[in-house]
Image (tube, rainbow, N blue to C red):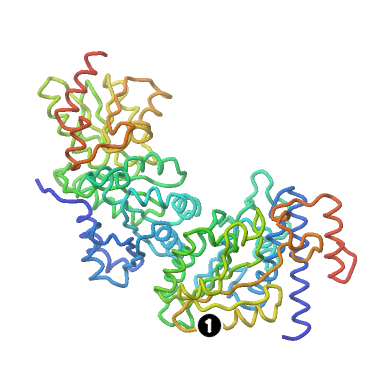
Amino acid sequence: MEFEELRRLEQVATQVRLQIMNMIYEAQTGHTGSSLGETDILVSLYFGGILRVDPKQPDWEGRDRFILSKGHAVEAYYATLAQMGFFDPDLLKTYCHYGSPFIGHPNNKIPGVEMNTGALGHGLAIGVGMALAGRLSEPDSKSRYRVFVLMGDGELAEGSVWEAAMAASHYQLDNLVAIVDRNRLQISGSTENVMSLEPLHSKWESFGWDVREIDGHDYRGLIDTFASVPFSKSRPSLVIANTIKGKGISFAENRAGWHHHVPTEEEYLRALDELNALLGGGAQ
Amino acid sequence: MTVVALRQVFNEVLMEIAPQHPELVVLTSDSRGSAALSPFAQTYPKQFIEVGIAEQNIVGIASGLASCGYTPFVFSPACFLSMRAIEQIKVDVAYSGTNVKLIGISGGVSYGTLGMSHHSLQDIAVTRAIPGLQVVLPSDRFEVRKLVDALLTDRHGTYVRIGRNPVRDVYADDNFAFEIGKAVRLRQGEDVTLVSTGEMVRLALDVWERLAHEGISATVLNMHTLKPFDRNAILAEVNKTRLFVTLEEHSIHGGLGGAVAEVLSQECPKPLLILGIPDEPAVTGSQQEILAHYGLTPEGVTNTVLGRMKRL
C-alpha cells in the first residue's frame, strides 16, 4: 500500500473519530470506547475498496451486505456511512435527539443500514440468511455478493452466535465473512474474567471456519486480509481483529469504563486536541 | 365433510405454488416431518432450507433471506418458535420489517401428552404485543389456502399458528372473502356473540347448533386475525346481542379473550365470558382430553354459556 493511501485512510479514520466524539458529547450518550475501537475496521471495509457498495444506490441488489451485529457501537458506523456519502453528515447533529432516525443503534430507515440491530447475537444468523440468498440468486460465485458481519467479542457469549456459526459451515458459505472486534473488554471488565472466550481461534476453526488473526488497527493487514476472502473455498471466513477499545484517544484506550462513558467537557476538548493534531492542523 | 390436518394443507399448497414462486423458500428446524413438509423438501430441495434444532437461528436466517428479496416460510413448533425465538421475531422480523412468515405448527395443546414445555398457550399473548407483526390463526383447509395466497402478496412479518391434528371444515367451499385483519361473520344471532379463532372456530359452530336447540340464537365471528384486530367486527355486534363469549386454545390471559376485552371495556362495556385454558400448567392427555377437561367441548361450552346467560 502506498504511503499516500495509508495517509488517506488515517485521515478518514480521524474524521470518523472526531465525528464520534462530537455526536456523543452533543447527545450526552453513546458507546465511546466501542466505536473508537472498531473505527479502523469500518474504514478499511468502506474506504479500503473492500465493500462493493454505492452510496448513490444504497439498495442496489448486487451490493455487498454489511451488518453491525455489535449495534451499540453505532456512532462509528453512522460516521463512516456519512463520510462515504450515504447521507449528509450534518444529519448526525440529530444523533439521539427526540424523533431523529439516528437512534442509538443501527436503524434500517437510514440509507446504507441493512438491518436493525442492538440485541446482541443476532447479526451472524441474519448474515447466514443473506449469504444463502446470495448463493440462491447468483450461481456464479465470482459475481455473487458477499456478506460481512462485525461482532463484538463480549457478544460471543450469546449462544445464538454459535448456532449461526454452525449453519454457516454446514452450508459452506464462503461468501460470508465474520469479523470479531477483539478488544478483550466488555462493560463489566475483561472478557476473560466475565466469560472466557479463549482459545477463540481454535473454537471458530472447530466450527468449520477458516480463521485469520490480525491487528485491527493496521490498514495494510486489514485490507490485505479482507481482500483475500474467502480464505478457502467452501468455508466461511473469520477474522479476529485485535483492537484497542477507545483507540485514538490516549486516555480512553484500553479502559472498560469507556465502553459507554460520555466524555466530560475537559475530556472532550482534550480528545479533540489529540485528534486534530493527527489531522496536521488546529482546525476543529 | 373432509377432515384434514392444516399442516398437510400447507404442504399441498406450497407444493402447488413453488414452481411459480422462485422467491418462496421453506425453512424447518428439524421439523419437516411434524410440519408434513417431507414431500416439499424432496420435490423442491433448492427452495428448502434445514436449519436444525435452532429456533433463534431459523428466524435470523429467514430475516436475512427476506431482506434480500426472498419470501421465507418458517415452520417450527409453535411452543419453541414463539418463545425461544421471540427476540428475533421482535427485532429481526417486526422491527427490521422483514417479510418473514412464521408458521407455528402443533400449536395449543396439540402435543397434549408432552407437558407444558410443548404446549403453546401463550403465543398469541406474546406475539400480538409486538408492533408490526401480524398474527393469524386459520380455521380450516379453505382458509389456509386463502391465507397462503394473502401471505404471498402481503409484505408484513406474520405469525401463523396451526394445530397438529385433523380438523373438520368450517366453510362449505372456498366461496368466501378472506382478508388478513377482517373477521368473518359465520352466523348472525340475537342473544349471544361467540368469537373464536383458529381451529376452535369449528367448536363455536358446534356450540351455535346446540344453543339453537335450546332456543338461543348466536352470532359466530371467526376472528382469524388477532393482529391487526378487527375492532369494528366486535363493536358491530354490541347492540345486537347481550353476551360475548370468546373461545380459544390458549391461556385465558392475553389472547383472543384479552383482545375482545380491550375493545369492549374501552368502547362499550358488555358482559364477556373468556373461555380457554386457565392459568395453570395444563393437564396432560390427548388434545381432545385436555380440551374436555377444561370444558371446551360443544356440550361443555353450551352449558357454561347457558349458565352465564341466566345471570344476565
User: Which residue is depicted at the point 34% across and 67% down?
Assistant: B49
Residue extending farthest to the right is: A282
Question: Circle 1 sits on which residue?
Answer: A231
Q: Amino acid at mark 1?
A: Phe
Residue extending farthest to the bottom is: A2
Q: Tell whether B79 sits left or right of A232.
A: left
- Depth check: give the residue in front, A36 or A89: A36
Q: How many marks?
A: 1
Q: Tell whether B163 sits left or right of A82.
A: left
Q: How far across and how far down the image is residue A98, in percent?
A: 67, 43
Provide the secondary structure element on which disc 1 rests.
loop
The answer to which image quadrant residue B7 occupies is bottom left
Q: Quadrant of the N terminus of chain A?
A: bottom right
Q: Tell whether B252 sits left or right of A22.
A: left
> Dot 1, how many residues are within 10 Å of its Cα: few (below 14), some (14-19), or many (20+)?
many
User: Which residue is depicted at the point 37% across and 61% down?
Assistant: B72
The answer to which image quadrant residue B28 occupies is bottom left
Q: How far across and how far down the image is residue A258, in percent?
A: 73, 55
- Depth check: give the residue in front, B106 or B174: B106
